[in-house]
Structure formats: structure tokens, C-alpha cells
Amino acid sequence: MGPPKIKLYVVTNNIKKGEEAIKILESLGVDAEIALVEKKEIQSEKLEEIALHAARTAYLVLKKPLAVDDSGLFIEALNGFPGPYSNYAYKTIGVKGILKLMEGVSTRKACFKTALAVIIPPLEKVYIGEVCGTITTEPRGTSGFGFDPIFTPEGETRTFAEMSLEEKNKISHRAKAYKLMVKDLRETWKTIL
Ligand code: IMP
């Protein structure tokens, strides 16, 4: 028998996001659990900085191997808005407000980006995942969360909110970041995940 597997704690304030992450990690064979520790969000233009700061503050409390993701929707026609301010934009203007800003706009390209910070002492790293697509003209679908009803990934006709969690997890920004993380931790850092 080798050394025991590391259990990874997923720190989030958003239960839907946590469940999504746990499913992704399960599919990769990683033992993971949602940690009910507050995710402290600093204001920054860089998702990487926001995620790393949240991970470090959560580690001070939890003191266990953990991962924190900070994500955002970057809309080309809005010069990248809401990007790192996606949480605030979602809570204030919401899906409807974004669609209003996009009224009459023909360039509808947008990308979801995740910065995933992981701390497994002494290791501290940030992984990036991205998926691009288009902003719809009206919300469609009821699954997922946040801006899922107005985002159609490239090569698809359905929005994320019209897909099952398994389907979203095959192509999402979050899934890409977690897959990169698990591969790197196992292959480069010989972490027992
Ligand atoms: P957070 O700061 O990483 O929690 O996410 C910022 C905001 O982006 C959230 O409030 C969501 O509205 C949105 N968001 C993040 N990830 C996703 C996703 O996978 N689908 C849809 N919206 C998302």
C-alpha cells in the first residue's frame, strides 16, 4: 500500500459552483469535499490574484489542502466587462442587465475564464481554464448558475443552462482548469490525489 490519498477541500461561497467542482474532481478520481469556509474576495483586475488571495486566507483557517476558483465572463464588445467584476455585475444588473448592454450589438463573442488557486503545502499554484462562445439575445435554460443561460459555447447551439452538468463539465472553463491542475499535481509534483 502506498501513501494515503490527499483529500482536497473546495472553498466556495457558491454551492452550485462547489457541486460542479466536486463532480469534476470525482470524474478525475480525486477525493474532494466542499469546505464551508468564507471565500474572501479582494478587488483586483486579475482573477489569478483574487483566487490566490482567497486561497491563502482560507488556508489560514482550514489548514488543509484546498482549491479556490475565481471565474468571470469577459465580453469582447464590452472590452472585457464584467470580467473580474462578474460576481458584482451578477448581483446588481444580472443576466437582464448584461443583455440590455448588448442590445443591438452584433459582435457577441465572450469567454468564461477560471483562475484556480491550489494550496497543498509547500506547493501553491494557479491554473487557468477558458472557454469562448457567444452571448445569446435572450436567456435560455434552467440548469447551472450565474450567466449560464446567456452563454453558448463554441460549436454548440445550446446555452450552458440548457446542458446537463455532465455536458457542461466536458467543456467548461472550470473543468479545464481542474483537469490541468490534477494532471500537473500528479505528473509534475507527484502528489497523491
Ligand atoms: P466567482 O467570483 O468566481 O464566484 O464568480 C463570479 C460570477 O461569475 C458569479 O457570480 C457567476 O455569476 C459568474 N460565473 C462564474 N462561473 C460561472 C459559470 O460557470 N457559469 C455561469 N456563470 C458563472
Image (cartoon, rainbow, N blue to C red):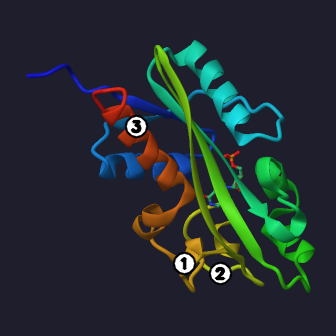
- The residue that label 3 is drawn on is 184
Q: Dot 2, how many residues are within 10 Å of its Cα: few (below 14), some (14-19), or many (20+)?
A: some
Q: Dot 3, how many residues are within 10 Å of its Cα: few (below 14), some (14-19), or many (20+)?
A: some
Q: Is residue 120 above or below residue 41?
A: above
Q: Is residue 6 above or below residue 15?
A: above
Kindly tell me whether mark 1's CB lies below 8 Å from ligand 1: no
- The residue that label 1 is drawn on is 162
- The residue that label 2 is drawn on is 140
Give the alpha-carbon distance from disc 2 to disc 3, as whole Å: 36 Å
Precedes in sequence: disc 2 or disc 1: 2
Please tell me whether mark 2 sits on a helix, a strand or a loop: loop
Name the residue located 81 percent from the left edge and 67 percent from the top edge.
76
The kind of residue tagged 2 is Arg
Quadrant of image for the C terminus: top left
Please tell me whether mark 1 sits on a helix, a strand or a loop: helix
- Residue closer to the observer: 23 or 130: 130
Q: Is residue 31 left or right of residue 124?
A: left
Rendered location of residue 159, percent (x, y): 60, 77
Rendered location of residue 15, percent (x, y): 56, 47
Q: Nearer the viewer, mark 3 or mark 1?
A: 3
- Residue closer to the observer: 67 or 97: 67
Q: Dot 1, how many residues are within 10 Å of its Cα: few (below 14), some (14-19), or many (20+)?
A: many
Q: Nearer the viewer, mark 2 or mark 3?
A: 3
For the image shown, how many numbered marks are present on the structure?
A: 3
Precedes in sequence: disc 3 or disc 1: 1
Give the alpha-carbon distance from disc 3 to disc 1, as whole Å: 31 Å
Q: Are marks 2 and 1 in contact (CB under 8 Å)?
A: yes
Name the residue located 32 percent from the left edge and 35 percent from the top edge.
187
The kind of residue tagged 3 is Asp
The kind of residue tagged 1 is Glu
